[in-house]
Amino acid sequence: MRKPRGLRAAVVAALLGLVAVVAGPVGGVRAAGSAPGTVGDITGFEAAGAVYRLHAGAAEARVSFVSDRTFRIELAPDGTFADPTGKDIVLPQGALPATRWRDAGDAYELSTSQVTLRAVKAPLRFELRRADGSLVWSEAKGLSWDKDTTTQTLARGAGEQFYGAGMQNGRGNTSHRGSTVEVGVDYHWDDGGHPNSVPFYLSSAGYGVFRNTYAPNTYAFKDPVTTTAQERRFDAYYFAGPGAKDVIGQYTELTGKPFLPPLYGLEIGDSDCYLHNANRGERHTLDALKIADGYTAHDMPNGWMLVNDGYGCGYENLAETAKGLGDRKMTLGLWTEDGIDKLADQVKAGQRIAKLDVAWVGDGYKFALDGCKKAYQGIEDNSDARGFTWAPESWAGAQRCGVQWSGDQSGSWDYIRWQIPTYAGATMSGLAYTTGDVDGIFGGSPQTYVRDLEWKSFLPAVMTMDGWAKNDKQPYRYGEPYTSINRKYLKLKESLLPYMYTYAAEATRTGVGPVRPLALEYPGDPEAATDAAKYEFLTGEDFLVAPVYQDSDTRDGIYLPKGTWVDYWTGRTYQGPTTVNGYHAPLDTLPLFVKAGAAVPMWPGISSYQDRTARSPLAWDVYPQGTSSFTLYEDDGVTRAHRAGAGATQRVKVVAPRAGAGEVRIDVGASRGSFRGKQTARPYEFTVHTGDAPRGVVLAGRPLKRLASASAFAKAGEGWYYDASDRAGVVRVKTAPRSTAHAFALTLKGASAVGGKTPGTGGR
C-alpha cells in the first residue's frame, strides 16, 4: 500500500494545479495490479476547483463537477486514468460550478449549491445527498474490479424503479426493477434483444447514471443494484434531479440533444431495392417512381423513399430519380453498405436521408457513432437540409444525429406485442426517434400490417420496407378493406404533424422524446411502472395509445391513469385511474384516448406537408376541462434556419367551467417569431368536444352565425355548427383568415363540460 504522499504530493499538485490537503486514513487496500479488488481506504485527498482526487493505495478516484447537479466519478485501479471515448460522446460543457469541500471526519463532503457527494473514508465509498440532506443514492460497497470489468454496487430503495439502457426489445416502458439488462451490440433484433442500447439508466429516486464507455455493460437491478462494464476502468456521470424528465435533460445536455427532423422525416417512408433485386427481378432505380405513383394513385401520404437496399442493389440516374420524387412531394434517400466517400456527390444529386448499415455501422460502438455523425454532417455540408440518418446498433450520443431502428423483424402478432414497450422505453434514455418497419421486413399478413400501421402512425418516424418479403409491402398492396384503413391512419398521422412537430422541437430543447411511457408522465402512479401499462404508451401528453396485438376485435387491460380520458372515436369518457376491458376494436379501430384538457393542433385534409399554402387553415381539436394550454411550434420544416432562431410559437389557452354547464373560452395568442414562409394570416377551424350545443359562439367580440347542416358548414367561409352525431356531440367552428400577429378569443356560450362530466384541471 502507498503512504500519504507528503512532499511528492505537493510537487505533483503544483504540476497539476492542485492543492494538497491532509491525507485520510491509511490501510485496507488490496494491491491493484491485475488481481481482482475492491477500493480500500482513502490515503490521500486533493482539491482543485471543481475537481477532486482521492487516493486509495495504488488506486485513484477523481470527482469532477460539470454543473450544480451533474458530476463525474472515475476510478483507475492502477492509478492511471484513461478515456477511450475522448470527445466522441460527451460534448463541451459550460462554466464549471462553484464547489466547496469539508472534512467531516468519517468522509470528505464535496458540495455544490444543490448536492453533496460524500466520499466515506474507510473504505472509500460514495453516497449522494441533496442540499436538504436527503439521500439520493449510496454505494453498498466500494467500487470493485477484476482483470476485465469494473462494478459499482448501489443499495436499492424499497420502492425504487429503474428505466433506460436504450432500446430494449420487448421491455423498457415499465420498470427494470428485479431484472438484468444487457447494454451492448448484439444484432439480436427480436424480443429480448438490445439494439441501439445506451449505457445510461435512471431511477425513480431522482437520479441517472451514464457510463462513459464503449464497452458492453450489464445492469442487474436487484438488491443490491450492480452495474458492470467490461473494462478495467470506471467512468460514470451522475445526474440529480426532481424527476425523470429533468434527469433526461441533464443527460442529453451532456451527450447531445436529439436532432430536429425535417417535416418529411415525420411522414412515413418507403424502402426497397430497384436494381439487381433477386426477390423482384431486374428493375431500375427510376422504377421507384412507379411505386411513388402508387402512393399518389391511392391517395396515401409518403414522405420519402430509400431506393436501394445496400446488399448488391446499387443505383443509377440518381439526380433524375430525386427530381421525380420531388415532383411527387417525396424526398430521396439511400440505404447503402458502402462507405461515406460517395455521400457528397449523392447529396448534391438530391439525397437527403442516409440509412446506415454494414460498413456504416460495423461492430457498433465508436464505429457506428462515427458513421452516424459523418453521414449526418455530410448531408448538411452539401445542402441546406437537416442531417437525417437511420441506424441499428448505435450508441450514446446517436440521438443527436439519427433515428434508431430496431432491425430486421418478421411481421406477426407477437412482433406487434413486443414492439409496443420498446420505443416508449427508449425515450427514457434520450432516444427521441426509435421505430421498426411496418409489419416487419419478412412475413406479415393484411391483418398484422393494418394493426401495426395503426399504432406506428403515432410514432414520430416510421417506414415500410420491401425487398425480402414474398410480396411488396406498401400500404396499398393488400386491397380493400385494408387499403382504406391504412389510408385513414396515414392521413391522421399527416394531419397531426403540427402536434408531433411541436413535440419534436420540445425534444430538441429538453431531450424528452414525443413517445413516452406512462411512468414518465405519471411518476406517482404505482401501476405505471408495472405490466398494467406495458402494452400502451403516450404520444405527447395528450394521446394514450393501446394497440391491439392479437387476432381479435377486443382489447383488454387498457390502463388509464388519473384524469378524464375521452375515446377518440366515440367521445365516451372514462375517469382514471381505471382499467378498461372488453374494448370493442374491429380491424379499423385503434384504441385511442385523449386526455381531457387537450388542445391539439392539426392540419386538416392534407396528404403531404407540401400541400400547405399561405392560406391553409390551422385546426384545433379541443377537449375542454378546467384550464389548459398548448404552445404550437412552427418553422420552415426543412432547412437549418431554426438553429439561428427562425421559428415561431403560438399559445392556445382553454378555460372551461369547473362544474356543470357554462362557457368555454379559447384564447388564441399571437404568433411570436418569424421564419421564411410563415403565414401572416390564416383561417382557423375548431372542433370543440362539449357534449351539447352552446347558446351561441362569439369570435373576437362578435357573434358567429349558426349553420343548419354539415353541408352548409362545409360551404361557408365562417360560422359554427353543432353535430350531435359526432363523438357524443361536438361544436365545429371556422373563421375567415385572421392575422397571425394578433390574438383573438373564441367563446362558446353555455357549453357543458366534456361528456357532461364534472371537469377538473388540466394543462401543460
Image: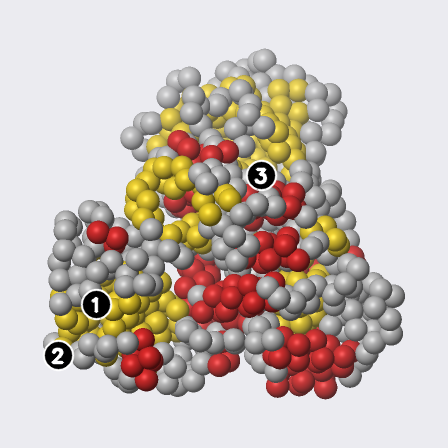
Residue 561 location, x and y as percent? 36, 40
For the residue labelled by badge 1, is the local secondary structure a helix, a strand or a loop? strand
Q: Nearer the viewer, mark 1 or mark 2?
A: 2
Q: Nearer the viewer, mark 3 or mark 2?
A: 2
Residue hosting label 2: 702
Give whichever of discs 3 and 2 has the lower sequence position. 3
- Figure quadrant of residue 465: bottom right
- Res. 678 in view: yes
Residue 422 location, x and y as percent? 58, 45
Q: Residue at x 28, y 70 (%)?
A: 732
Residue hosting label 1: 667
Q: Is residue 56 above or below residue 352?
A: above
* The one of 8 and 312 positioned closer to us in this rendering: 312
- For the C terminus, the quadrant is bottom left
Q: Name the kind of residue labelled 3 in the image.
A: Arg
* The one of 163 and 646 positioned closer to us in this rendering: 163
